[in-house]
C-alpha cells in the first residue's frame, strides 16, 4: 500500500514525499521517499519531543495522508490506533490537507478509537475501502466519508525469475487440461480464536489437507498451488504450506506445487493472474487475484473481508470458519460456495 501510494502521489505531481516510520526497523522497506522521520517514542509513549519534530516537519509539506489499512480501528492495538489518529489531528491543525485512506473498521470498535475519530477537525476527509466500513463510520461520527478501495488494487504485477517459475508450472499443467487452484493457509486468521496455538496450527494443516483432497476428489482435473503471503514468525504461511504438502496423500501430492521462493506482493499478483480460482486466508492475496480478474474466496476475520467482497457483489465468497475448535474437514465451513 505504501509503494502504491508513493507511486500515485508522484504521478499526480507530488515530487516531495516524506514517510513517517514507527521504528527504525521499518526503514528496511523504503518506498523511495524524499525524507523520512522515525517517531518511535511517540508511538511508544506519546513523546512530546516527537510531536514537535512532526509539527516542525509539517511546515515543509502541504498534505498529510494516513494509510489506515487494518490498523486504524484498534483491532491490533487500540493505543497504536489512537496515536495514528493523533497525528492526523496534529496535521490538520497545522493546516495540511489531511486524508485517512484505505482503511477498514471492524464490528467491535473500541470507544477510545471512536472518541479519537470524533475529536478530529472537520477538515479531515475519510476514504474507507469497503461499504461496511463506511456504514460503521457514519454510525458514530458525522465526518466527511467517501467509499474508496484498497490501494493494493493499484499494485502492478511483477515478472521475476521466482514468479515465472511458478507460472511455468501452471502453464505446463494447463497444457494437459488441468485447472490451477491457488491455496493460501494463514495462521493469523486463528491466533485469537484458539487457546492452544499448536493445536490451532495442526488443525489448520488438517483442514487445508482435507480441503485439497476433497476438491481433488470432486474434480481430478484440479491442480493446486500453495501460495504463502505472510512470512512472519514461527507460524508463517510458508511453513504451513510445506507441512500441508507433506501431509497430502502421495497420489494428490503430484498435483500440488508449494511455492518455495519468497514472493513479493507484486510477484504474487503476477502468479494469481494465471490461476482459475483462489482460496485464501489473507485479504490482500484475495485483492491480488480480484485485481487481475480472478475469482477468489477468503476466510473472514475482524469483519473486513465481508466488506471487501460486498464491494464486488460477491459477499457469498467471504467464508466463515465456525466458532470454537478449528475444523478438520471442509464440512466445517459455513457461508461461501465450498460445496461447488
Image (cartoon, rainbow, N blue to C red):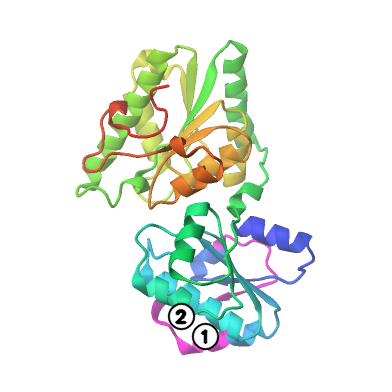
How many numbered discs, if any? 2
The Cα atoms of the two marked residues, 1 and 2, are separated by 7 Å
Asked if one can make out residue 306 in the rendered structure from this viewpoint, the answer is yes
Instruction: Locate residue 164: give its quadrant.
Output: top right
Q: x, y (%) of residue 191?
A: 30, 50
Q: Which residues are magenta?
A: 28-54
Badge 1 vs badge 2, beta-carbon distance below 8 Å: yes
Q: Residue furthest right?
A: 13
Q: Residue at x 50, y 25 (%)?
A: 181
Question: Circle 2 sits in a helix, a strand or a loop, which is it?
Answer: helix
Visible residue check, residue 40: no
Instruction: Work out whether residue 116 or residue 66 is closer to the camera in this orientation and state it.
Output: 116
**Residue 271 found in image quarter:** top right
Residue at image point 62% right, 20% down? 171
Q: Earlier in the sequence, mark 1 or mark 2?
A: 2
Queried whether the magenta region covers residue 41, the answer comes back as yes
Badge 1 element = helix
Where residue 319 appears, as percent x and y from the top left, is 39, 37
Mark 2 Cα-neighbour bin, 10 Å: few <14, some 14–19, many ≥20 = some
Q: Position of residue 137 (x, y in %)?
A: 47, 64
Q: Residues within 10 Å of mark 1 (few under 14, many from 20)?
A: some
- The quadrant in which the C terminus is found is top left
Above or below for 220 versus 147: above
User: Residue at coordinates 48% horizontally, 45% vertically from top-left?
Assistant: 283
Q: Nearer the viewer, residue 234 or 313?
A: 313
The image shows residue 48, relative to residue 146, as above or below, that is: below
Q: Which residue is mark 2?
A: 42
Q: Which residue is mark 1?
A: 51
Left or right for 117, reference 202: right
Amino acid at each position: 500500500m505504501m509503494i502504491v501510494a508513493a507511486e500515485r502521489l508522484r504521478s499526480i505531481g507530488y515530487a516531495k514525499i516524506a514517510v513517517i516510520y514507527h521504528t527504525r526497523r521499518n526503514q528496511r522497506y523504503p518506498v523511495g521517499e524524499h525524507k523520512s522521520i522515525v517517531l518511535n517514542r511517540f508511538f511508544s509513549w506519546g513523546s512530546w519531543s516527537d510531536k514537535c519534530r512532526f509539527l516542525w516537519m509539517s511546515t515543509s509539506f502541504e498534505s498529510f495522508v494516513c494509510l489506515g489499512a487494518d490498523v486504524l480501528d484498534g483491532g491490533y492495538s487500540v493505543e497504536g490506533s489512537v496515536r495514528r489518529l493523533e497525528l492526523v489531528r496534529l496535521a490538520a491543525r497545522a493546516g495540511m490537507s489531511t486524508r485517512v485512506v484505505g482503511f477498514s473498521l471492524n464490528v467491535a470498535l473500541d470507544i477510545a478509537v471512536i472518541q479519537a475519530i470524533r475529536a478530529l477537525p472537520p477538515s479531515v476527509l475519510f476514504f474507507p475501502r469497503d461499504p461496511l466500513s463506511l456504514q460503521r463510520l457514519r454510525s458514530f461520527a458525522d465526518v466527511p466519508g467517501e467509499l474508496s478501495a484498497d490501494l493494493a488494487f493499484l499494485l502492478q504485477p511483477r515478472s521475476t525469475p521466482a514468479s515465472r517459475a511458478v507460472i511455468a508450472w501452471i502453464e505446463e499443467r494447463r497444457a494437459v487440461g488441468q485447472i490451477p487452484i491457488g491455496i493460501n493457509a494463514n495462521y493469523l486468521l486463528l491466533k485469537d480464536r484458539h487457546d492452544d496455538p499448536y493445536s490451532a496450527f495442526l488443525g489448520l494443516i488438517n483442514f487445508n489437507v482435507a480441503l485439497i483432497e476433497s476438491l481433488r476428489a470432486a474434480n481430478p482435473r484440479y491442480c493446486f498451488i500453495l501460495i504463502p503471503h505472510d512470512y512472519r514468525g514461527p507460524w508463517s504461511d510458508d511453513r504451513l504450506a510445506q507441512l500441508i504438502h507433506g501431509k497430502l496423500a502421495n497420489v494428490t501430492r503430484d498435483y500440488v506445487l508449494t511455492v518455495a521462493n519468497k514472493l513479493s506482493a507484486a510477484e504474487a499478483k503476477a502468479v494469481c493472474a494465471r490461476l482459475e480460482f483462489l482460496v485464501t486466508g489473507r485479504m490482500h492475496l484475495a485483492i491480488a487475484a480480484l485485481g487481475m480478474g480472478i475469482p477468489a474466496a477468503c476466510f473472514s476475520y475482524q469483519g473486513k473481508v465481508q466488506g471487501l467482497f460486498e464491494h464486488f457483489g460477491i459477499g457469498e465468497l467471504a467464508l466463515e470458519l465456525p466458532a470454537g475448535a478449528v475444523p478438520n474437514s471442509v464440512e466445517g465451513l459455513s457461508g461461501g460456495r465450498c460445496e461447488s
